[in-house]
Image (spheres, rainbow, N blue to C red):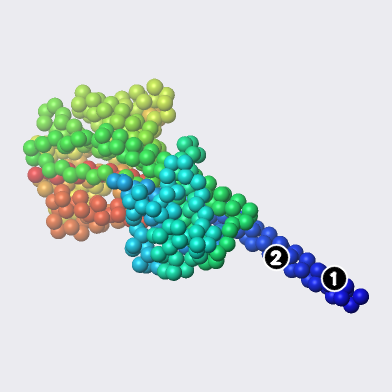
Amino acid sequence: MHDEATELLHLADRRVEFLTRVVERERAAREARRDLQRLAAASVAATTIDEVLTTIVRGASDVIGSQLTSVALPAEDGQVRFVHVDTAPDDLVTDWSTATVDTEFPLVRALDAGATWIELADRTQIAEWPLLAAEIDRVGISSYLAVPLRSRATREPIAALGLGFATEAELDSVDRALVAELSELAADALERVSQLQHARAVAETLQHALLPRRLPVIDGLKLRTLYEPCSDVTDVGGDWYDVVRLPGGAVGLVVGDVAGHDAASAAEMGRIRHVLASHLVEHGDPAVALTLADRYFDSIDDATFATAVVIVLDASRCRLTVASAAHLPPLLLHHDSVIRLDVEPGSPIGSGLGGHRCTQFEVGPGNTVVAFTDGVIERRDRSIDQCLDELAAQLDGLTDRSPSAVLRVVRDHLDSPDRTDDAAALIATVA
């Protein structure tokens, strides 16, 4: 009777122990899924391949509890690039920064077409991979898993995830499900960012192709230009500049900004630039050119919207004629001062509202006109007027007012961590 009671108590204890493990495992699984959700949110915020890779290797260690987490990514010239969790030993990170595609290493082989999971549950299985076996003591792992990260479109690996664990153990069904979800999340994030970067590269190529390939050489005028894309990989805009020879020896200077941040905006920029330049050559009047361009793009009804400032510089008459389509005023550097060329703002190109007016200013030898888009000056914590005044003050502090010196100030001014737009500028100095 006593033995039977003891046995029942042992059975009860084992049952309690089993249920406790089940509860703890379920609790750990719920926490892991919360970590996975946080990782998914973080991966969506990533905008570059390196940001995605860093996010994945850090998050995977939290979700899966791996001792070592790495990602392998195909690179150029038959190479594979590795990114390791930041807790990995420095010498391992150095030794395993790259490898060739034929390296017999689980994480590299997981990049092969048709590759499946490579599961090494203990050190005996790891020993079948000599390069990995040589590293187990350095990183403190006793089991390893390499998982292909597959494209949703092709189902072929675009990267591979490597997970090293401190203990010898096979993954249970819960862990396998987490790894499967993690691998899909990582692959989707990498594919999304790759597509973003490709779209940006296409738009940037288009943007640069539509800007003037070279500036005209004009007697008595020194020119400098600038175009800088936004640092945000998801954005590329429609900022432009142009220099147009006009009948009679005058020169047309144009800077503008098309609304939007994509390849369509860059393409639209090319259309507006050429339409505006043709009207400027035909009529020689900035306000007329803007008004005609505004009417044309309003008439075709394709949601074109752009700002621009057009300047006709007639050095022989020491005169600037300026008109604006809702654009920022240019700055004029004299020998001892900097002034804003405030003009009637007019309406944006494509609005059909017109209202463009010319204003004239005097200009002389050594004077410099600086026209730019809002990406050069705009800051989140300042008004436009404050931003304009700040750039004007920086330019006013120059002792060397050559166009190259002015360009350096403009370039330094736009190198701000909170810049959220692309930037264009045109600098013209009367010799």
Quarter that holds the N terminus: bottom right
Name the residue carrying label 1.
8
Please determine whether, in this image, residue 291 is positioned above or below residue 115. Answer: above
Whether residue 388 is visible: no
Q: Which mark is residue 412?
A: none
Q: Quadrant of residue 296?
A: top left
Give the x, y percent position of residue 201.
33, 40
Label 1 secondary element: helix
Q: Residue furthest right?
A: 1
Lateral position of residue 14 relative to residue 266, left or right: right
In the drawing, does residue 157 fall left or right of residue 14? Answer: left
Q: Residues within 10 Å of mark 2 (few under 14, many from 20)?
A: few
In primary-sequence order, the first of circles 1 and 2 is 1
Residue at position x 33%, y 63% from top? 94
Circle 1/circle 2 CB separation < 8 Å:
no
Amino acid type at circle 1 is: Leu
The C terminus sits in image quarter:
top left
Q: Nearer the viewer, residue 109 or 227?
A: 109
Q: Residue lying furthest top in this view? A: 299
Work out whether residue 342 or residue 103 is closer to the camera in this orientation and state it. Answer: 103
Q: Position of residue 181 (x, y in %)?
A: 57, 49
Circle 2 sits in a helix, a strand or a loop, which is it?
A: helix
Q: Residue furthest bottom?
A: 2
At label 2, which amino acid type do we have?
Arg
Q: Which residue is mark 2?
A: 21
Left or right: 105, with 287 as reference point: right
Residue 150 in percent (x, y) is at 48, 43
**Callout 1 environment at 10 Å: few (<14), some (14 to 19), or many (20+)?**
few
Against 3, residue 329 (above or below) is above
Relative to 259, does residue 139 appear above or below in the rendering?
Answer: below
